[in-house]
Amino acid sequence: MDTDDNIHDNIKTVSSWLIVAICFFLTPVAIAAVSSLVKKDNVAPIFVINLLVSDVIQLCGMIILRTGQGTVFITGDCMYTFGLSASVGFMLCIALERYLVIVWPLWYRTRQQVKMLLLLCAAVWTLALVLVFVFYWNVYVWAGLYHTIFGVLLLLPFPLLVFFLVGTLRALSASISVRAEEKRRIVGLLVLVLLIYTLLFLPRIILFLVDPHDYKLNVLAILFNNLNPIADLFMYIFLRKGAVNHVCFCLCCCKKNRTSHQSSSGLNDCDTVTSL
């Protein structure tokens, strides 16, 4: 391995341990906080809780990948792939649930049952497990195809996420019964899910399909992928009532302070020129 590869490997190792250290402290706190938001008429947090659990599995896989060898390394790789696949599935479930709340509200209220949602969660976990078996079966049987198959399967949610966001925006623009804060929370959560998928997942998926053997691009794509557990923590903001308004208020205060500071600096400069 040349010097550049050593540098890239060190960057990947340091970033992985840093992400693991941060997320192993914050993710359990986020799971407990989101669990307190689960209500009979608000079941979206169930999907977020499962998403955070999939992040924990990814973190465990990252630890094993950094420390294990041989069979242990393969186990860690399977865990990471399993958590990654489940994470994509639950992101799709979150977007679908928010879409149904706005576009098909009556159908959603009559069909919404905790048992049905739990069955959907079980289906996502099962499909993720099947995907892992398919992935590693292709590694040993059709070594040249497994990257393409895995990339195509993970790419399928992308058009659906875009469809859910666009459909929700259209429905919200014509809706007068949904409060402004609720609109911001729903749109914010959908935008966050799409951004996480596009920025952190899509680069590696494209790499799977285009050039899976480029080491430098793989390191960069894996680094983006590993940031996923940190990005998922921000979903709590768009689930808790009042949290979005509080964030907007803080941002407005910062902007006002910066503007007033610039204005005062401009007045002081004018005074200085006048005195000269």
Image: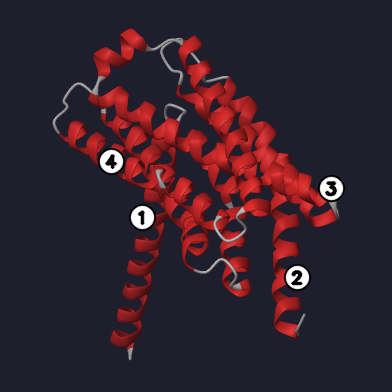
Answer few, some or many: residues within 10 Å of disc 1's Cα (few below 14, many 20 plus, some between 14 and 19): few
Estimate the spatial distance between the alpha carbons at disc 4 and disc 2, rounded to whole Å.
Answer: 39 Å
Q: Quadrant of residue 10?
A: bottom right
Query: Which amino acid, mark 2?
Result: Asn
Marked residue nearer the N-terminal end (2 or 3): 2
Marks 3 and 4 sit apart, C-alpha to C-alpha, by: 40 Å
Q: Which mark is residue 72?
A: 3
- Tell which circle, 3 or 4, labels the residue nearer the N-terminal end: 3
Answer left or right for 41 relative to 59.
left
As measured in the structure, the alpha-carbon distance from the residue carrying label 2 to the one carrying label 3 is 21 Å
| Residue that label 2 marks | 10
Residue, disc 1: 256
Q: Which numbered dot is residue 159?
A: none
> SS at mark 2?
helix
Marks 2 and 1, Cα distance to the nearest angstrom? 42 Å
| 192 vs 258: above or below | above
Place of residue 202 in the rendered image (x, y in percent of width and height, measured from the top left): 46, 56
- The crowd level at tag 3 (other Cα within 10 Å; few <14, some 14-19, many 20+) is few
> Residue type at mark 1?
Lys
Comparing labels 3 and 4, the label whose residue is closer to the camera: 3
Residue 126 can be seen, yes or no: yes
Which residue matches tag 4?
Answer: 163
Reading the chain from its start, which is encountered first: label 1 or label 3?
A: 3
